[in-house]
Image: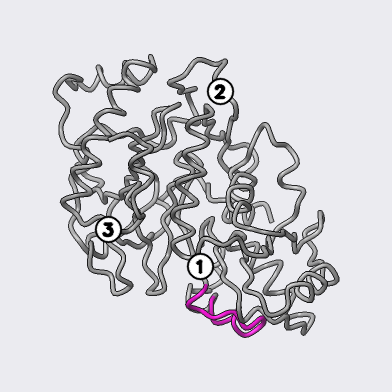
Amino acid sequence: MKIEEILNISPYSLAKAEKTKMLDERLLEMTVHHYMSCDLYRRYIDALGVNISRLPSYDQLPFLPVRVFKEYDLASVPKEEVIKTMTSSGTSGQQRSRIYLDRATSANQTKCLAKIVESFIGKSRLPMLILDSSAVIKDRKMFSARGAGILGFSVFGSKRCFALDEEMNLDVEGLSDFLKEHDGEPILLFGFTFMIWEHFYKRLKGLGYKPDLSKGIMIHGGGWKKLESEKVSPGDFKASLNDVCGIEPGNIHDYYGMVEQTGTVYMECECGHLHASAFSDVIIRRPEDFSIAGIGEKGLIEVVSVLPESYPGHILLTEDEGVLEGEDDCPCGRKGKYFKVLGRIKNAEIRGCSDTYAAKF
């Protein structure tokens, strides 16, 4: 199935059998494409003894450890076709992943993200409050994961306002003017978890300023490491934001994603579950032998995406631990797997946008 056909599928409409068939076909094609087009990937597949003409089902295809993009330049298109290089978040001194995008892959990432997010917020663009500083998107050619996240989600905004200035201080006057202009309208809020907590929630609470965001829909991501160390749970996070600005807890959606698979984010539903869309999958693997773990069993998170054509990032083993909570039976009604992220494996580098910023902060 061609990517254009896949991206016409409703994001959470495929049950297990139909989705497995589609992913098998697409991911086998992608594996052959990257094998033929990327020398380092071909050498990796050959070293594993995989017969490229007799590939197994997608859940048995070789995965790349996600950190390989920090150590090697992996591309499946000629250099002259690369229009954008994206880099992962990282603390000072860390190597960063480098992801090379051609025009088609970049466009498909945007289409995929739009399909997923629109299923949560509707197709109409909304006035958008970005809970960050505009300084982070200054360099349009070398995107950081944080800047890419802001720009990627900005397409859903009809008019955009950055809530923080370049020193990461809350722009109370700008925020007040924006909300007056859009009084009574639904507002989309986007930001990274720790920054929202530190620079938005704490500042509002300290100032005693309570903007009315009761019609707001918040999307946030980037990791929980710092907030967990402060004993702030997802429930506390939602309740605290409801207290200072009236946003309903059911309208606050975490997401899990990474620069190595931009576009195929895993959104949190109103029941508190992260969902794999029709365009992606998550597989939990036992760390001792990489066999597939069952529902409720802790293991390493493997992420699968139908999008990466300009680089071999379609099947990646992350350094995160998680638990598969179910498939096709979430009370929210969305089909597909739903899961929980438990955190980074021991001794893994900090990498989420929120967590790396918190480490610097």
Q: Which mark is residue 245?
A: none
Label 1 sits on a secondary structure element that is helix
Which residue in the protein does label 1 denote?
Answer: 228
Label 3 sits on a secondary structure element that is loop
Residue stretch in magenta? 238-251
Upstream in the sequence, badge 2 or badge 3? 2
- Residue 79 x/y as whole percent: 55, 16
| Kind of residue at disc 1 | Glu
Q: Residue at x 60, y 30 (%)?
A: 84
- Label 2 Cα crowd, 10 Å radius (few <14 / some 14-19 / many 20+): some
- Residue 70 x/y as whole percent: 50, 31
**C-alpha gap between disc 3 and disc 1:** 28 Å
**C-alpha gap between disc 1 and disc 2:** 38 Å
Q: Is residue 13 above or below residue 23?
A: below
Which residue in the protein does label 2 denote?
Answer: 82
Residue 112 left/right relative to 160: left
Say whether residue 239 is magenta: yes
Q: Residue at x 51, y 67 (%)?
A: 228
Of the pair 150 and 201, the residue shown nearer to us: 150
Label 2 sits on a secondary structure element that is strand
**C-alpha gap between disc 2 and disc 3:** 33 Å
Which residue in the protein does label 3 denote?
Answer: 336
| Kind of residue at disc 2 | Val
Whether the residues at callouts 1 and 2 have beta carbons within 8 Å, the answer is no
